[in-house]
Image (tube, grey):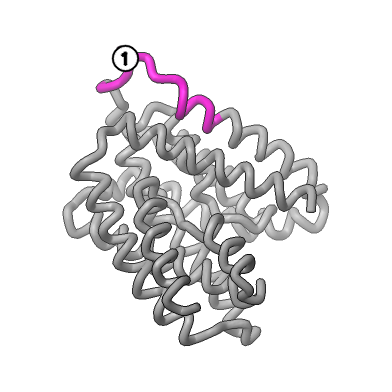
Amino acid sequence: MNITVSVLSFILSFVFALGGVGSAVVLVPIMFSLGIPINEAKPTGLFINTTSLLAASFSNIKHKRVDFKLGMPIIISSMLLAPVGAYLSLFINKTIVMIIFIVFLLFSSGVMIFFNPKKYEDKFRDDRPLGILVFTGIIAGLLSGLLGIGAGGLISPLLVVSGFNPKKVVTITALVVPFSSLTGFLAYLKMGHVNIQLLIFAGLAAYLGGYLGTHFMHLKMKPMTVKRFLGIIVFLIAVDLIIKLFK
């Protein structure tokens, strides 16, 4: 079982690193279907998210691909607002917010996959508008805390639709997601729902897959291809949320 999950971890971490997001959204239900208890599958998925995207971020930082001036306002504002979102979850109907979020994800994925006018292909914005970046972080942090989900599925479409280069968006998202995944994993670790042997095998495979995936993306893929790939991943996240909503 460890070998099977490790192989899946490598493949999915490689594929999802192309979009700068974690593979747990797909890997957790696969592990559960293989007979791994859900309380072990969830922390394993979060740990895989953390290791694969840390590897992706390491590669991006090493090759000087991360625009920290673009990313830091998002990271800081999302981290500050996530606790606020968690507090608001005590008073706001999560189902209504989830439905609105799913509609947004479906719309955004459609834009990223199908909207591709040639005149915009090589005209991505290079500025760093503080207002847009802080707004993105605030919305991502609030929804992440409110719904208990990762912020990557919101940050990517907001930045891509705002006109930023999808390759740059991938590096920013990959830098943000490990923080939320790590905190979730530590919570499970404290509760004792962790298979250490599985974590070691799957974590190492995820690290290698994440590193190679992000390296391949920057070397071989065009920005518009990355944009469509991001759209597909955002669509998968929306489908996963729809399934959870109607369970």
Q: In this view, does 215 lie to the left or right of 175?
A: left
- Residue carrying label 1: 118
Q: Can residue 72 be seen in this view?
A: no
Describe the element under mark 1 as helix, strand or loop. Answer: helix
Q: Residue at x 46, y 34 (%)?
A: 132
Q: Where is residue 28 in the image (x, y as percent from the top left)?
A: 57, 64
| Most common SS among magenta residues | helix
* Between 237 and 168, the one nearer to me in the picture: 237
Is 117 in the magenta?
Answer: yes
Inspect the magenta stretch and tell me whether residue 242 lies in it: no
Q: In this view, does 238 lie above or below 89?
A: above
User: Which kind of residue does numbered mark 1 sit on?
Assistant: Lys
Q: Residue 186's image quarter?
A: bottom right
Q: Quadrant of residue 128?
A: top left
Query: Residue 183's x, y, as percent?
Result: 54, 70
The magenta-colored residue range is 108-122
Of the pair 24 and 7, the residue shown nearer to us: 7
**Which residue is found at the position 46% from the left and 79% from the top?**
2
**Who's the residue at 49% across and 49% down the image?**
152
Give x and y (percent) for residue 107: 59, 28
Mark 1 is surrounded, within 10 Å at the Cα level, by few (under 14), some (14 to 19) or many (20 or more) other residues, namely few
Q: In this view, does 165 lie to the left or right of 90?
A: left
